[in-house]
Each structure stands twice: as structure tokens, then as C-alpha cells.
Image: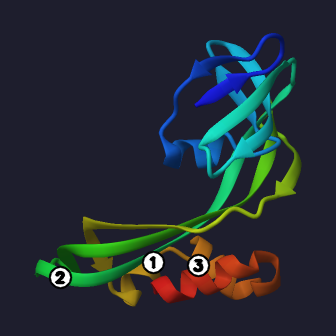
Amino acid sequence: MVVDTTGEPRVIAEVSFPTALTTLHEKAIYLHEARQYQVERFDYAGRKAYVKRVDSDYYTDAIDYTQVKVLEEFEGEALAGARRAHGDVRVNRQIVGFKKIKFYTSENVGAGKLSMPEQEMHTTASGCIFRRSFWRAFPHTPRREAERHPRAWGMRCARWRRCS
């Protein structure tokens, strides 16, 4: 639930909880019906965000770390140098920060750190698993860049190596 506290408090929107984590974290610029609101407080337990109307020249974009672990494979088959698979997975996701992106220019004008609890979800998924030889044809993938510049990529480097 999104509560506008600019004047008399009133509910202006209802947002799914997973969406709220990326769009209604504290300090976020929330866009609603062509208006901008800054999130003053996010009540995680009560699942409410308290916002105030603002006039901003930027919006915010959440930064998250997501890990997918295959729990059980129902079916799978070789597919032209790759493997197609379907099965149960566990998805862990944590929102760790946000970027401030300027309207019209897409310039990064700032960032912030967030400390939100990790979310865990069990679901089914389908995907393709490619051999390492396939990725060698793409020398500038994020994984390759992380291997070349591990300090610049920080935790992302470890994430990409787990995926290879």
C-alpha cells in the first residue's frame, strides 16, 4: 500500500510486495499517474510505503543481487551445443542499493546503499545452459569483464563465476 503524506494522508496505490521492494524502498522516486513522489519511509513489516510529492529531475533504479539454484530437474535434453532444462529452482534476491538516473539524458547522478532482507522464492523454471566454448565467442560479456577487472566488479565477479 502506498500512502501519500503530502497533505492529509491517503492511499494512492497498491503494489505487489516484490515490486514494492524495487520501486518503494526508502529514498526512491516513485512515479504514479505522471507525478513524482519520494519515499520517506518503507514499513517492511506492515507492507506500506509513505511518500511525499516532489519535483525531481531524476528517477531511481534498484540494484539487486539474484541467485538461482536448481533444486530438481524434471526434464532436459541436449540442444545444438547447449542443454535445455526444466525443473524446480530456488531464487534468492536482495535489494542492495539504487542508482539515481537523470531524465532525458540517462546520466547516473548518484547512488545509495540499502540494507533490505533477502527474499527467497521456490518456483519452476526453464532455461538453456551453454558450454564455455559458446561464451568464448563473446569477449565482452559481463562475466569476462568481471574476470579482467575483479575489484571494479566487486561481488558481481563472484556471481558471474558461479554462473559459468
Q: Are marks 2 and 3 in contact (CB under 8 Å)?
A: no
Name the N-terminal-most of marks 1 and 3. 1
Of residues 21 and 4, which is closer to you in this image? 4
Identify which residue is drawn at 19% across, 75% down: 85
Answer whether residue 104 is visible to the viewer in this image: no
Q: Measure the alpha-carbon separation of dots 2 and 1.
A: 28 Å
Q: Which mark is residue 83?
A: none
Q: Which mark is residue 143?
A: 3
Identify which residue is drawn at 78% across, 59% down: 114
Percent coordinates x, y for residue 160 in the rendering: 56, 81
Name the N-terminal-most of marks 2 and 1. 2
Quadrant in the rendering for residue 71: bottom left
Q: Which mark is residue 73?
A: 2
Q: Measure the alpha-carbon separation of dots 2 and 3.
A: 25 Å
Q: Is residue 7 left or right of residue 136?
A: right
Percent coordinates x, y for residue 129 in the rendering: 30, 79
> Which amino acid lies under the numbered mark 3 shown in the image of this protein?
Arg
Q: Residues within 10 Å of mark 1 (few under 14, many from 20)?
A: few
Above or below, 64 against 61 in this view is below
Identify which residue is drawn at 24% across, 74% down: 88
> Which amino acid lies under the numbered mark 1 shown in the image of this protein?
Ala
Residue at image mark 1: 137
- The residue mark sitting in front, 2 or 1, is 2
